[in-house]
Amino acid sequence: MPRFQNQVLLLTGAASGIGRATTLKLAAEGASVFATDVVAEGLEETLKLANAAAASSGARLESRVTDISDEADAQASVAACLETFGRLDTLCNNAGVIGYRHTHEMEFDFWRKILSVNLDGTFLMTREAIPHLLETKGAIVNIGSTAGLSGLAYGAAYSASKGAIHAFTRAIAVEYADQGLRANSISPASIETGMTRPQAMPEGANFSLLQRLSSLHGATGPEAVADLILFLASEDARHISGEEIRIDGAALA
């Protein structure tokens, strides 16, 4: 029997990169997937690809364009997942944004945008999902970053948001452990996605400072992170909770 048959997973950031790769792998394993993203066109393409994989596995797929940083939209997304599938077994908070500034020149609006998506969005989706995950003794998988474990030059807002996600995940893991809910975070680095392609850098940036978080094995595709997400969401990881798992090619070893 496919590993995720009769399991319902809600995934944010599904329009590309890690989110798309995870959706495709879940579809191949028979899951019921509720995929969300703010980018409608990318989300539509993900579902198109996933439906092809679902043809032989019996997976069920549904999507919703969602701005997770908006409280009402996050609430509506979780409610729509429950209305569609009737239960929730795993929440994967994958959606995120990045940007670079000299910290002393960083606009407050820029800071708030990064934190509102990465941190507020993770909180809002988690808060709404927890009551339903407690019913199924489910799991939460949050996508952090090695930038939340080690300094990222010019990325203070991104690092702050990801470091907070790790702390938030640990708190949840402890708070709900006696009720059977598991929560873990993943710290990727050198993963080939839109977020890791060349980004606008502030004037005078020292690019050598950015190399310290690079994989010693070179970059790899988002499927590697997707494999780890599926493991943490599965029964195989039934005794793993409160962990920060790096998938960074020894960057922080």
Image: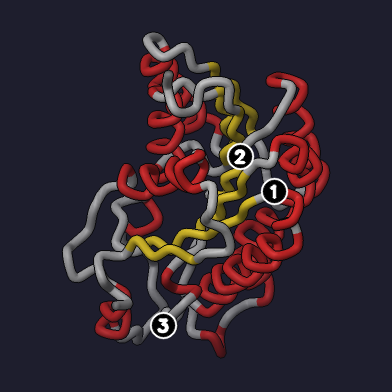
Query: Where 176 sits versus 11, above or below?
Result: below
Circle nearer the viewer, 3 or 2 = 2
Q: Amino acid at mark 2?
A: Thr
The percent position of residue 194, horizontal first and vertical second, equals 37, 51
Residue matched to label 3? 153
Circle nearer the viewer, 3 or 1 = 1
Quadrant where the N terminus sits is: top left
Q: What is the number of the mark on residue 188?
A: none
Mark 1, other Cα within 10 Å: few <14 / some 14–19 / many ≥20: some
Is tag 3's residue or tag 1's residue first in the polypeptide sequence?
3
Front one among 246 and 212: 246
Is tag 1's residue or tag 2's residue first in the polypeptide sequence?
2
Label 1 close to label 2 by CB (< 8 Å): no
Q: Amino acid at mark 3?
A: Ala
Furthest toward the left, the residue is 217
The percent position of residue 240, horizontal first and vertical second, equals 52, 56
Residue matched to label 2? 90
Task: Give the alpha-carbon distance from disc 1 to disc 2, as whole Å.
Answer: 13 Å
How was the colour assigned to the protein in this rendering? secondary structure
Locate residue 180 relative to residue 54 in the image: left or right: right
**Residue at left offset 39%, top offset 65%:** 246
The percent position of residue 139, horizontal first and vertical second, equals 61, 46
Mark 3, other Cα within 10 Å: few <14 / some 14–19 / many ≥20: many
For the question of whether residue 96 can be seen, the reply is no
Residue matched to label 1? 180
